[in-house]
Image (cartoon, coloured by chain):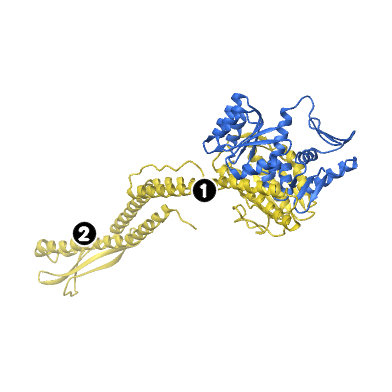
Amino acid sequence: MNKKLLHKTLRPYLIYSVLILMISAPVFYFATEELYIEDVDDTLLLHKKEFLKHAAPTLKFTDIPAWNRFNRDVKLESGKQLITDTIYFTTYFDTLDAEIEPYRELNFPVTIQGKPFIHSERISLVETEDLIKNIVFLFVAIISILLTGLFFISKKLSQNLWKPFYKTLQQIESFEIDKINQPEFANTDIEEFNRLNASIVKLIEKNTAIYKSQKEFIENAAHELQTPLAVFQAKIDTLIQRADVTQEQSEILESLNENVSRLNRLNKNLLLLSKMEHESYSGRQSILLSNYIQKNLEFFTEQAKAKHLIIQMDLQNDLEIKSNPVLAEILISNLFLNAIKHNIEDGQILIVIKGNQLIFSNSGRNVPLNTNRLFNRFSKANPSEKGTGLGLSIVKKIADINNWIVLYQFENNRHSFVISF
Amino acid sequence: MKLLLIEDEKELAIGIQKYLTDKDFVCEWANNTKAALDKIAIYDYDCILLDLMLPDGNGFEILKEVKFQDKADGIIIISAKETLEIRIEGFNLGADDYLTKPFHLSELLARIQALIRRKNFKGSNIVGFNEIQIDILSKTVKVGDKIIDTTKKEIDLLLYLIGNKNRVLSKGAIAEHLSGDMADMLDNHDFVYAHIKNLKKKLMDAGSSDYIKSVYGLGYKWKHE
């Protein structure tokens, strides 16, 4: 699946942030704890110094029971020998809270009135734990707020940053080379986007110019061919009047005649196509579609007779369309003739008006047509057939001009062209 | 009948002149605006065939001049340039018909005859050929005193054949004449045969001579010895 540009930039940010958060939270926790323990150790050592300096020289044996009794966390013990200071973690059972609580304890040897004692002091770590937990929680909260903030800010920023890009994209998407309106790009304050816009404008201008000259070429070529074709036609018309034409010559003339008229049709249809691109068929009127079909039905029935085709109509409702009347007639005629031309002997043609759709469906060869090339100029199902190969591209062009949709369907061995108005 | 052909393409002009010239028509030719205006100033014409693209000017100028001087009965524009705008401008300036190049000479003749019939219309409009009489207004065909039942297309075909009598008409030319604007889309001309056959049968059943002859490989001919 394609991702949006915005998501592409945001994703690494997001992954990075979450990763950092996940790593930093425990690291922060342990670091804070470490620092705090260090702090507790310093306090214990300071107390030791104070004790040795102020209390120890004046302390007597008789004071010791009282000392031990009134000091909760400091004890003096006799009998045991200790060579150096020891500092360690330990736990005591708190009878009031009925909990085992963590402590940090410092033992060091001390001499009172000549006798060795062990001085032990402990500091509860219960509050410390809570503190650390609180700090960590606070830390996580702050970081989270920071990250969410960053996420939204960068999202917003990216959106703003890419706005000119999306505008350009939209313009290009709605651009059609055969329409007059050129895209207009607003100036941005970002150099890269200005460059992009400038190159697109250049590209479009160049392509439009090429397209225009091609179009003009087709039109001019078709126009220029008219006169020589007229001479050609006139000469053949004159030649066939001669009384001394032999059978062989008349066969050649017949073939010439057929081909000049085919050339003629090709030329006229090409002209029609390029004229439609010039929008010289803009005058729109309301047209009742069924009237148009009925009007030409006699002509088409006559055309269908050779193949013994059955024409059926199913006009379910009146469909009124807005179009240039000449083009509407050309559209219907082309669809009709198409249905006749590609039909089989004793085949059928069904014309349906349903809702806003006009459907021409006909029997024919039992293979679906190639939809990719169907509406292209000079695309023929059978290259050797006599048609111009322009009929369906004219249909498509007329539909495009009027913003109608043409669809081809192949169902139950029936070829259908559906025009949605 | 006197015609003026204004056309700069020599080959085409010769072809048209040759086809139109028989005992009914005198066809003069001018190949530029100046020559055309000179001729128009001196003579009156029944019909002018006017090409729009001329080496020394636009055919519309001639059209305006002809209408201003009232020098012709009818004007048919024959042009390679065909847009709706030009067509409309042509008709607005007073042209009677518009034929786009390339065309069949037989078609041109049929148009000229139709135009002259319209212009010379005096109460009735009947085209006759021996025992056959066609009333164009009421769309009826009589063989002798017998009215025969014909379709609009068949009358059209009959007029076309009689108008081009003794000339070979190719199947394509007949098909194009009968299908009008639809001709450009049509690539099968077989329907002509059915029309010819029906018309021939109806005429002969009513007692007319067999005028419609098929010319091998080429088409049909209204033959009058």
Cα separation, mark 1 vs mark 2, equals: 113 Å
Residue A94 appears in the figure: no
- Image coordinates of residue A187 in percent, x first then y, are 36, 42
Position of A139 relative to A283 (above/below): below
Q: Colour of chain A?
A: yellow
Q: Is residue B104 left or right of residue A190?
A: right
* Of B198 and A317, the residue lying toward us: B198
Q: Earlier in the sequence, mark 1 or mark 2?
A: 2
Residue A287 appears in the figure: yes
Which quarter of the picture shows residue A331? top right
Which quarter of the picture shows residue B15? top right
Q: Secondary structure at mark 1?
A: helix
Q: Which residue is mark 1?
A: A217
* Of A44 and B54, the residue lying toward us: B54
> Around disc 1, counting alpha carbons within 10 Å, would you say few (fewer than 14), some (14 to 19), or many (20 or more)?
few
The chain containing the residue under callout 2 comes to A
Q: Is residue B207 left or right of residue B214?
A: right
Q: Secondary structure at mark 2?
A: helix
- Which dot, 1 or 2, sits closer to the camera? 1
Residue for point 81% across, 48% down: B213
Q: Amino acid at mark 1?
A: Phe
Q: Amino acid at mark 2?
A: Phe
Position of B120 relative to A407 (above/below): above
- Image coordinates of residue B81 in percent, x first then y, are 58, 40
The chain containing the residue under callout 1 comes to A
Q: Which chain is drawn using blue?
A: B
Q: Which residue is mark 2?
A: A70
Viewport quadrant of the C terminus of chain A: top right
- Image coordinates of residue A46 in percent, x first then y, are 15, 61
